[in-house]
Image (cartoon, rainbow, N blue to C red):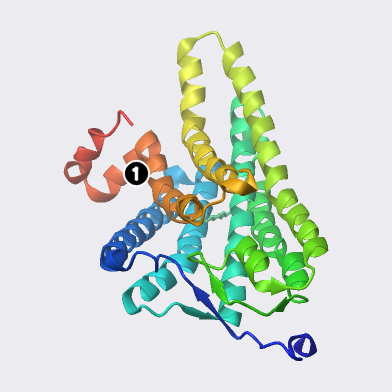
Amino acid sequence: MANKRQGNQTIITEFILLGFGNLPQLQTLLFLLFLVIYIVTMAGNIIIIALVVANQNLHTPMYFFLGNLSCLETCYTSTILPRMLASLRTGDRTISFGGCITQFYIFGSLLATECLFLSVMSYDRYLAICKPLHYAALMNGRFCLQLTACSWVSGFLAPLPTMLLMSQFTFCGPNELDHFFCDLSPVIKLLACGDTSRSEVFIVLISLIITVIPFLMVLVSYACILYTILKTTSSEGRHKAFSTCSSHLTVVILFYGSACAMYLRPKSSHIADVDRVVALFYTVVTPTLNPMIYSLRNQEVKAALRRLRGRKRFSNIQGWSWF
Ligand SMILES: *[C@@H]1O[C@H](CO)[C@@H](O)[C@H](O)[C@H]1NC(C)=O
């Protein structure tokens, strides 16, 4: 690899992430905005983790998965936001070659793990709603642990083939990325030189496998859930079944909706500004909203929160229950 980067071309050791550099007058405002978002995201997700770990009532598969999802999201935002905040503050937009690749790998792994978690969680809801009598036996502690461990391990293995392919690219510049983090497609499209089309096909295939298969599992699970709910005659039973999966469904729609908005648009309509806003959605907004969606919609989480802090202080959350 070292040899390939030598030769006549300049060796690129640093990238420049333009980020929001086209809005110089807004740097302070953006800094404050993202700082607040970062604090809210970390606080929300850490509260969920603490609730799940500390509360015996929440020691069920659904909440273990939720706790793991929150854990993942604290890491996920932390791979992107702190660096972005620093660059908004200092104006220094450079990122080393190694830093860029590391950010890309960690972000990619967590993204793959998130896809797997969402599908595991929908399978859990499928078992709970469509096979209620066998749920406890099927989704036992051991199986739950296996699913969680498998998601983490496969998530971190998933981007390795892509990394291997990328290590064979030559990066000859320009070294400016019109994005706020080292995402895969801008890095390859703009910075790699030589013919990368064959590798690109492989990389797209790998990304599709990582995201589409879990997505299909989510669809199949929800098709079965919907079928069961429609078959239920009592409206109370229907309501109960729907309320246990509505939080998860909202999270799935947010996550896959923004991912589809990013990657399934025709190429000609890719405008850097729009891309940045859509990317902000799945990197920054979703992790912020997830704990709120779960804690506001969910009676058990609300009850745990109330127990944790005493009734009075959280009584104002009640006012939000229309959500
Ligand atoms: C993650 O999942 C495992 C196994 O299901 C569970 O033991 C652990 O408590 C979970 N972690 C959190 C933070 O919820």
Q: Amino acid at mark 1?
A: Ala
Asked if one can make out residue 131 in the rendered structure from this viewpoint, the answer is no
Q: Is residue 121 visible?
A: yes
Residue at horizontal 71%, vertical 87%? 9
Which quadrant of the rendered structure holds the N terminus? bottom right
Measured as percent of width and height from the top left, residue 173 is found at 63, 78
Q: Which residue carries the number 1 mark?
A: 304
In the image, is 187 to the left or to the right of 195? left
Residue 226 on image: x %, y % = 60, 21
Q: Is residue 153 above or below residue 164?
A: above
Kindly give the residue lying farthest to the right in the view shown.
Answer: 198
Image quarter for ligand 1 equals bottom right
Crowding around mark 1 (Cα neighbors within 10 Å: few <14, some 14 to 19, many 20+) is many
Camera-side residue of 22 and 236: 22
Q: Nearer the viewer, residue 173 or 280?
A: 173
Residue drawn at the location 57% of the way across and 46% of the way down: 269
Q: In the rendered image, which quarter is residue 83 located in?
A: bottom left
Q: Is residue 240 left or right of residue 321?
A: right
**Residue that protrudes farthest toward the top in the picture:** 233
- Is label 1 in a helix, a strand or a loop? helix
**Image coordinates for residue 50, horizontal then vertical, percent:** 39, 56
Residue at 34 percent across and 44 percent down: it is 304
Q: Where is residue 92? Give x, y as percent.
A: 40, 80
Which is nearer the eye, 247 or 108? Answer: 108
Q: Residue furthest left?
A: 312
Rendered view: 127 above or below 58: above
Residue at the image position 29 percent from the left and 64 percent from the top: 26
Query: Is 210 left, or right, of 124 in this rendering?
Result: right
Q: Quadrant of residue 12?
A: bottom right
Q: Quadrant of residue 171?
A: bottom right
The image quadrant where one finds the C terminus is top left
Q: Is the residue 75 above or below the residue 266 in the image?
A: below
